[in-house]
Image (tube, coloured by chain):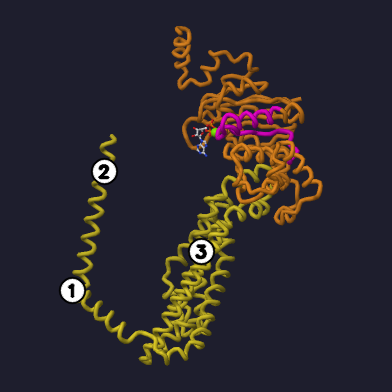
């Protein structure tokens, strides 16, 4: 019996590896991807980048402009995340196994979570652009919907995990639904929830650049403008500023995490 | 007069064999009753059916003359405020302080709004402090519960139950996760809660010797059936073997071994 388990596990590994090889080789053949050319052009691209794509003294004069747009983008990401978090929190509490009012809420909350999470951000931006054209509202909504999907799922699992014991204890004392939520579920799950929130803000600042490219707003738009006008020095400065901003946000949120967890 | 009366209580989960099979007994005010039986014999299910954290499939449970089985949501909460519950895993909100966790026991007595906001009266806080002191936790009042030892956590659990002013406390293996000396402290406290405060206690236990030493009456469960109900003095080794028998015929084998030695 026991030997069977080990043999089965080994066979599984072999099958898995074989599938991986077939998939890789298959997709190279089907897309007619030239492996050698791929590598050489990568090196070429790197050389081109090193010789053109760097900020020079002139581009630094555009820095104030860039920072204004960066600030806009960061604020929009934070706004989209926090608004999404409020809605997600309601969905998660009503949908979580331990705190739901009825099973149907779980199905609905999970459905909303999956739908919004699995739709690519770019697709959201394109669809919303039809309705709201190129505006910061479009970017905000695209980030909002993506975050709503992700956070609903993350919050729901957090509550499932941490809430159960305390919910049971407080319910058995005769406490009503909302006191149990506010006195047990939220305090117990708050550190993880804040942690997910910070993660979402980080992700959204990165994604906001891409969305901005499409919707013509924020720092993404600025990058697009300079890139398309062949001003690679400023364009590279924009990229560097974004990277630094994301690093700062990551550092800050790691600090916050360390304090609350 | 009987405080608690169970008549033909049966509980089926999904399996073929019932978790509780036609259980009937009554408990008088001020009694300290232990429920013993091997793991999976239905101790937890029995305790939870009493305050309807688990719904019995059939049978009748009356508490203080009120038939609990038929109560609506609001009345059930009313009854639950009179029944405290203590858990093997303590079921505290670890991130909150001792005093906050103890005050959770008052939530059933409060309006929803006061409960949500965690507003407690001066009397309630005094009472909580008195109980905390009685259980020897006065040094830990404002400490977070995740900094406490297992024995201290369980004392917080007891305090939370006591602050409800309960008529009955249900204890589900309260000492199963504790070291022997903490376990003794907890059992001593429970004994004096019964003797000095006149609270009725029903406790499920793993250890027969603890049941013999501390409780007034023992109920033995075997696969959901009450196979013993009487004072510790009547629990002979033969009756004890019956309680822990895997199959009915095992009893004779056990007896044979015991007689031989
Ligand atoms: N939520 C549940 N769903 C299905 N079966 C359960 C559930 N809880 C307990 N059982 C079953 O009911 C029986 C009694 O369990 P339990 O009351 O937990 O026993 P004990 O507390 O004495 O160990 C066991 O066979 C267990 O598998
Ligand atoms: Mg149990």
Q: Position of residue A106 (x, y in %)?
A: 53, 55
Question: In the picture, residue A17 is in which quadrant?
Answer: bottom left
Residue at the image position 51 percent from the left and 36 percent from the top? B13
A30 is higher (above) or lower (below) than B260: below
Q: Earlier in the sequence, mark 3 or mark 2?
A: 2
Are tags 3 and 2 found on a single chain?
A: yes
Residue at the image position 59 percent from the left and 66 percent from the top? A86
Q: Nearer the viewer, residue A259 or A107?
A: A259
Give yes or no for residue A118 being in the magenta stretch: no
**Residue identifier under label 2:** A8
Of the chain colours in the picture, the one used for chain B is orange
Q: Nearer the viewer, residue A220 or A127?
A: A220
Are tags 2 and 1 found on a single chain?
A: yes
- Residue B104 falls left or right of residue A210: right
**Which span is picked out in magenta?**
B163-191
Q: Nearer the viewer, residue A173 or A76?
A: A76
């Amino acid at each position: 019996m026991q030997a069977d388990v080990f043999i089965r596990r080994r066979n599984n590994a072999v099958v898995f590896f074989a599938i991986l090889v077939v998939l890789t080789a298959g997709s190279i053949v089907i897309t007619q991807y030239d492996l050698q050319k791929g590598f050489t052009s990568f090196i070429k691209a790197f050389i081109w980048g090193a010789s053109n794509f760097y900020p020079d003294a002139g581009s630094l004069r555009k820095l104030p402009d860039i920072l204004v747009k960066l600030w806009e983008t960061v604020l929009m990401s934070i706004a989209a995340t926090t608004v999404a978090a409020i809605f997600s929190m309601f969905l998660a509490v009503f949908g979580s196994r331990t705190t739901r009012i009825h099973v149907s809420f779980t199905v609905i909350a999970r459905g909303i979570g999956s739908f919004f999470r699995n739709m690519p951000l770019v697709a959201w931006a394109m669809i919303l652009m039809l309705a709201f054209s190129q505006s910061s509202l479009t970017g905000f909504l695209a980030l909002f919907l993506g975050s709503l999907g992700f956070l609903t799922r993350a919050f729901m699992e957090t509550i499932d995990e941490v809430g159960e014991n305390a919910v049971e204890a407080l319910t058995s004392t005769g406490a009503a639904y909302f006191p149990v939520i506010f006195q047990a579920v939220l305090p117990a799950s708050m550190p993880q929830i804040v942690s997910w929130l910070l993660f979402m803000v980080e992700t959204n600042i990165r994604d906001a650049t891409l969305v901005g490219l499409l919707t013509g707003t924020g720092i993404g738009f600025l990058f697009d403008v300079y890139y398309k006008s062949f001003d690679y020095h400023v364009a590279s400065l924009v990229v560097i500023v974004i990277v630094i901003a994301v690093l700062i946000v990551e550092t800050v949120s790691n600090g916050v995490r360390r304090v609350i967890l | 007069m009987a405080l608690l009366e169970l008549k033909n209580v049966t509980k089926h989960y999904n399996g073929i064999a019932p978790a509780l099979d036609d259980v009937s007994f009554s408990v008088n005010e001020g009694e300290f009753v232990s429920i013993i039986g091997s793991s999976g014999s239905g101790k937890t299910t029995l305790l939870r059916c009493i305050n309807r954290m688990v719904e019995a499939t059939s049978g009748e449970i009356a508490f203080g003359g009120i038939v609990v089985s038929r109560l609506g949501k609001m009345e059930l909460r009313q009854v639950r405020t009179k029944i405290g519950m203590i858990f093997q895993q303590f079921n505290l909100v670890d991130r909150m302080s001792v005093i906050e966790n103890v005050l959770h026991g008052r939530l059933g007595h409060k309006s929803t709004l006061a409960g949500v906001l965690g507003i407690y009266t001066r009397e309630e806080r005094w009472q909580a402090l008195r109980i905390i002191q009685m259980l020897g936790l006065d040094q830990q009042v404002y400490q977070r519960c995740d900094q406490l030892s297992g024995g201290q956590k369980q004392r917080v659990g007891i305090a939370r139950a006591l602050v409800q002013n309960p008529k009955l406390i249900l204890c589900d293996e309260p000492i199963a996760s504790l070291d022997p000396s903490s376990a003794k402290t907890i059992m001593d406290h429970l004994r004096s809660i019964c003797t000095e405060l006149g609270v009725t206690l029903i406790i499920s236990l793993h250890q027969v010797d603890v049941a013999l030493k501390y409780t007034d009456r023992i109920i033995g469960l075997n696969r959901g059936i009450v196979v013993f109900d009487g004072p510790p003095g009547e629990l002979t080794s033969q009756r004890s073997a019956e309680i822990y028998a895997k199959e009915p015929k095992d009893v004779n084998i056990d007896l044979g071994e015991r007689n031989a030695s």
